[in-house]
Amino acid sequence: MPKEKISQDGLKRARKFINGNAWIFAKTYAKTAPHEYVVKDKLPNNELKQEFEWMVVLIRDHGYQAEFWGKVHTYLDIDGKKYWTMGEPLEETIIINRAEIEGVPKQSEKCSAELTIVSWNMRGGGSAETWDYLLNLKPDIALLQEAIIPEEIADNYTIFHEHALSKTGRKQPWGSAVLVHRRFQATQAVLKSRLRPWVETALDKFGGSFIGAKVKTPRGEVLFLSCHSPAWNLPIDGYGIPKEAQLEIQGEGHPNDIWGTEFIWQYLHDEIEGDRQCVVGGDFNCSIIFDETWGSGNQEFIDSMADLGLVDCVRKHHPDPRSTPTFKKPKDGKVEHQLDYLWATPNLAAALAGCRIGERQIFERQLSDHLPIIASLIFKKEGGAL
């Protein structure tokens, strides 16, 4: 049934909102999906914020549904431009998008699929509100840490999840997980190295911190890894690591210690080769700012991931490493460290249309002490990257 047309008064009010705000050009999508947006939280007063909410309701009450890059949104056409939101509940909607009507391609013309990936430390399992926020992002793949999975998630997602272990070996109620939307086929990946048998033993001892899934995507099979490197180092003895390997991975200043990041790096070093496609995301408890206090190690790890040929998805769209903090310190509330990362092999990074950090209202709403990383991969109809 066709929706009722907007009244002349409504149209006049909408034009006043449109013309009275500064629309921001989305540089991240300049080549793939040029559009502009306005952010509710940046509006200067409550009156404009109320008009923002009115505009959202107008779009949803009078708009039409259309598929764009494999997802359905509600659009409203006004004066040669179309306006839309991402479909979150009204109280959680903070962005209105707009684009030229002719500038929004039909899904069938441009590409066959958009893959949305979210990586997030949910803090202590994740509250009901935290899970609502995640699901409103509509992830196809979710790489989660400190997650307790509600039963109803299995209705729409295949779940790969293991409980984490504390420093003393005690089983935690939460753990790392990979959620895969049920429209994709997926199996759990066994994290073992063909070259170093001790890597599998070591990763098992970090139980529930690292988990992987092999997923059949429009681009073929992709290995997705969810990682949570514990915030503590452990003695290097006791993991079955040969002496020559211990000497190779021991770092200056902590010759008898080892971190979880070193185990996952060894696995990736041995297993990512040729055309293998892989996405690695999670909380690595690694910040370049730590190096200013405790010396080297953090930048060294980030550089070592680049040495493997992995592309830092956040850096690709936000070059300044200090512009994307993801963690709120519990003691003083400062937000200065990026502890969370998302890496992809070059064959997938070529399809990266956008990558952003979640809004800081997550901290204000106490959903987590980490912000999620949200990335979009877009594939051409014939299977290549845009």
Image (cartoon, grey):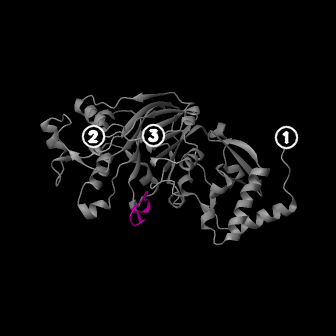
User: Is any atom of residue 18 visible in this view?
Assistant: no
Q: Quadrant of residue 71?
A: top right
| Residue 129 counted in the magenta span | no
- Residue 326: x percent and y percent? 43, 57
- Residue 319: x percent and y percent? 42, 58
Label 2 and label 3: CA atoms lie apart by 23 Å
Residue marked by disc 2: 263
| Callout 2 secondary element | helix
Q: Amino acid at mark 3?
A: Leu
Q: Amino acid at mark 1?
A: Met
Q: Are marks 1 and 2 in contact (CB under 8 Å)?
A: no
| Callout 3 secondary element | helix
Label 2 vs 3, first from the N-terminus: 2
Residue marked by disc 3: 348
Disc ID at residue 1 = 1
- Residue 341: x percent and y percent? 40, 50
- Residue 263: x percent and y percent? 27, 40
Query: Which residue occupies the foreground of this view, 301 or 35?
Result: 301
**In the rendered image, the vertical position of residue 96 relative to residue 46, given as above or below:** above
| Residue 328 counted in the magenta span | yes
Label 1 vs 2, first from the N-terminus: 1
Q: Quadrant of residue 1?
A: top right
Q: Residue at x 19, y 47 (%)?
A: 257
Label 1 and label 2: CA atoms lie apart by 58 Å
User: Is any atom of residue 46 visible in this view?
Assistant: yes
Q: Residue at x 78, y 51 (%)?
A: 61
Start-end of magenta stretch: 322-335
Q: Amino acid at mark 2?
A: Phe
Nearer the observer: mark 2 or 3; the answer is: 2
Label 1 vs 3, first from the N-terminus: 1
Label 1 and label 3: CA atoms lie apart by 41 Å
Image-based side of 16 in relation to 30, left or right:
right
